[in-house]
Amino acid sequence: MPLRLNPTLRDRLHATDRALFGGWVCSGSPVMAEVMAGSGLDWVLIDMEHAPNGLESTLAQLHAVSGYPVTPVVRVPAADDVLLKQVLDLGAQTVLVPMVSTAEQARAVVAATQYPPAGRRGVGSALARSARWNRVDGYLANAAEHVSVVVQVETAEAVENAGEIAATPGVDGVFVGPSDLAASMGLLGAQTHPDVVAAVHRALAAVLAAGKPVGVNAFDPAVAHAYADAGARFVLVGADVALVARASEKLAAEFVTTPGDDAERPSY
């Protein structure tokens, strides 16, 4: 019986005019992924860059969220052809690739996610979850329809090239990372510094001018709303581990006396 795959992030963005708000899954836990997936958020980011995730745990989390009306995005740790091939074969339909600073790098990412002759993705769909083991009719011919590619702009160089990166054929969206952007500007840990915020807004404007949807990471609600008002279409507004960390600290503050432990921490 032929099967249909779920909408990609590109499809979700095209289907609505509002911003899509998502949550980060950094724990490596399929249970936590399922908790986040059932929260009512629009999308979840399963992270392989800054989380203890390999192929097996990423697959388990894709399984865990598959029963919910949420769009999973898998962030790979690097723009590596082999890893992108493996993650796509796991059935990830939307991939986020970090540290893309030039249009040339963006073109290389796109090529790694498409089958020849458009790209150089290795062919193994009959053996993989991506095509549900050959149960998705025409998967090879129509694979690009089932794959959404988002690249991450997170350096000062990338901000200057954001428009060209966004205009790269096959790039479906650009995600701005204020944390690494701040670090590249000599402002480590200061994601809401006025210079960093201004750089984020320049990136947002450049991507929108290129006609592509743009996203951003912002755990501060006021900042997240401001970026959405500026045109950000998909926004990460929290992470599983951060939510648990802050909530458990509130419990400790309520029930355990810890004098002097009032240090302010970066949101991300």
Image: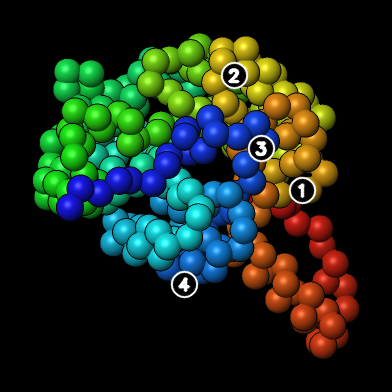
Distance of label 4 from label 1 (alpha carbons): 25 Å
Look at mark 1 in the image and give the residue it sits on.
220
**Which amino acid is tagged 4?**
Val
Distance of label 4 from label 3 (alpha carbons): 26 Å
Residue 52 in the image: x percent, y percent? 42, 61
Position of residue 227 in the picture relative to residue 49 (left or right):
right
Q: Earlier in the sequence, mark 4 or mark 3?
A: 3
Q: Earlier in the sequence, mark 2 or mark 4?
A: 4
| Chosen colour scheme | rainbow
Which dot marks residue 31? 4
Query: How busy is the neighbourhood of tag 3: few (under 14 within 10 Å), some, or many (20 plus)?
Result: many
Judge depth for marks 4 and 1 and give the one in front: 4
User: Quarter-wise, where is residue 148 in the image?
Assistant: top left
Q: Which residue: 14% across, 46% down? A: 134
Closest to the observer: 100 or 128? 128
**Which amino acid is tagged 1?**
Asp
Look at mark 3 in the image and give the residue it sits on.
19
